[in-house]
Image (cartoon, rainbow, N blue to C red):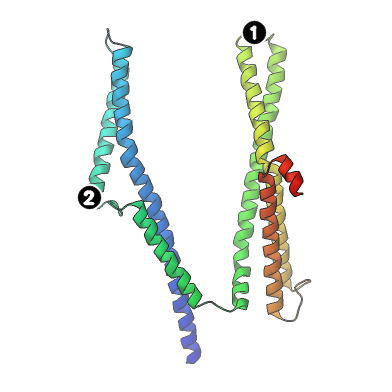
């Protein structure tokens, strides 16, 4: 009976903590939606006024002594109607309707609310902190998500590097081809200038952002974490101690060291070349 009560107590605590996290996620979503709502309330009328001024400016400065083309009038009139309706609908939803969940609420109030929820969440966690072995076991279960994230970012940077390289290849080949085909008259000069600009930008971006190095570091960290997780799961060295608590502690320490090394490598990549040499 006592055991079942203990299980129920743990379950209720877990549900309460999960409830806090869901509330925080919901508030973050509401803040994002509220920002979009405020952006629409401010931006739509501004665009409407800009279109009206543009329409009037075209009439005054371009077609002052003639009729404005019907196509221009039609486009401007349609834009004014659409933007006007959008402005009316947004202001109605903000001040007269309850369609928007947080209509009339400032982002500052939502941020204050999420801060209070996070504070209650932290206090709840502190009051019911599990023992270190349970936290280490939970840490082990969370690692697959971290490994997946590292590999996804590695794939992203690898694809970005390949895209940059292909753009660089085609642009460099295009410069040579245009130079050989034309004797640098117009419009060949414009094409050469554009291709040379692309080559310069892609080369500079590749050297600055270093997507290849970032992809390699992320993949290396993910593989190392996966290797240690497999060793812990199979009970092989260095995680072959008789006590499970010792293995979990060593595993958590090793993985945190790998993640710290990954963060250090990212910081080194963000430094200028001279700064990297000094760090190394």
User: Going by the image, does 40 lie left or right of 28?
Assistant: left
Characterize the local packing of mark 1: few (<14), some (14-19) or many (20 or more) Cα atoms within 10 angstroms: few
Of the numbered discs 1 and 2, the one sitting upstream in the chain is 2
Judge whether residue 78 can be spotted in this image.
yes
Q: Residue at x 69, y 20 (%)?
A: 175
Q: Nearer the viewer, residue 182 or 35?
A: 35
Q: Percent from the top left, x then y, of residue 144? A: 62, 62
Q: Residue at x 34, y 46 (%)?
A: 37
User: For the image shown, how many numbered marks are present on the structure?
Assistant: 2
Judge whether residue 23 can be spotted in this image.
no
Q: Nearer the viewer, residue 29 or 162?
A: 29
Which residue is label 1 attached to? Answer: 185
Q: Which picture quadrant has residue 119?
A: bottom left
Q: Residue at x 64, y 44 (%)?
A: 157
Q: Percent from the top left, x then y, of residue 244? A: 69, 79
Disc 2 is placed on an element classified as loop
Which residue is label 2 attached to? Answer: 97
User: Going by the image, does 56 lie left or right of 131?
Assistant: left
User: Going by the image, does 261 lie left or right of 138?
Assistant: right
Residue 215 is tagged as none
Question: Residue at the right extreme?
Answer: 237
Q: Residue at x 38, y 59 (%)?
A: 112
Disc 1 is placed on an element classified as loop
Inter-mark Cα distance, 1 to 2: 64 Å
Q: Percent from the top left, x then y, of residue 123? A: 46, 72
């Amino acid at each position: 009976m006592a055991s079942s009560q203990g299980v129920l107590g743990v379950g209720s605590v877990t549900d309460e903590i999960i409830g806090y996290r869901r509330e925080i996620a919901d508030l973050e979503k509401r803040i994002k939606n509220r920002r979009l709502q405020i952006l629409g309330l401010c931006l739509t009328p501004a665009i409407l006024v800009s279109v009206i001024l543009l329409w009037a400016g075209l009439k005054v400065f371009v077609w002052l002594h003639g009729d404005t083309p019907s196509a221009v009038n039609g486009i401007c009139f349609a834009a004014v109607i659409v933007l006007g309706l959008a402005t009316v609908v947004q202001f109605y939803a903000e001040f007269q309707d309850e369609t928007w969940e947080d209509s009339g609420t400032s982002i500052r109030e939502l941020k204050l609310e999420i801060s209070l929820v996070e504070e209650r969440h932290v206090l709840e966690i502190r009051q019911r902190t599990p023992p270190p072995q349970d936290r280490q076991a939970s840490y082990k279960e969370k690692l697959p998500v971290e490994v997946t994230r590292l590999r996804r970012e590695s794939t992203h940077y690898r694809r970005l590097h390949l895209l940059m390289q292909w753009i660089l290849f085609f642009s460099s080949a295009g410069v040579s081809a245009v130079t050989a085909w034309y004797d640098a008259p117009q419009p060949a000069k414009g094409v050469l200038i554009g291709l040379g600009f692309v080559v310069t930008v892609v080369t500079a971006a590749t050297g600055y952002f270093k997507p290849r190095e970032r992809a390699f570091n992320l993949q290396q960290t993910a593989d190392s974490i996966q290797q240690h997780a497999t060793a812990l799961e199979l009970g092989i060295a260095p995680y072959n101690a008789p006590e499970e608590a010792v293995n979990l502690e060593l595993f958590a320490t090793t993985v945190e060291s790998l993640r710290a090394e990954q963060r250090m490598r990212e910081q080194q990549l963000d430094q200028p070349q001279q700064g990297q040499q000094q760090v190394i």
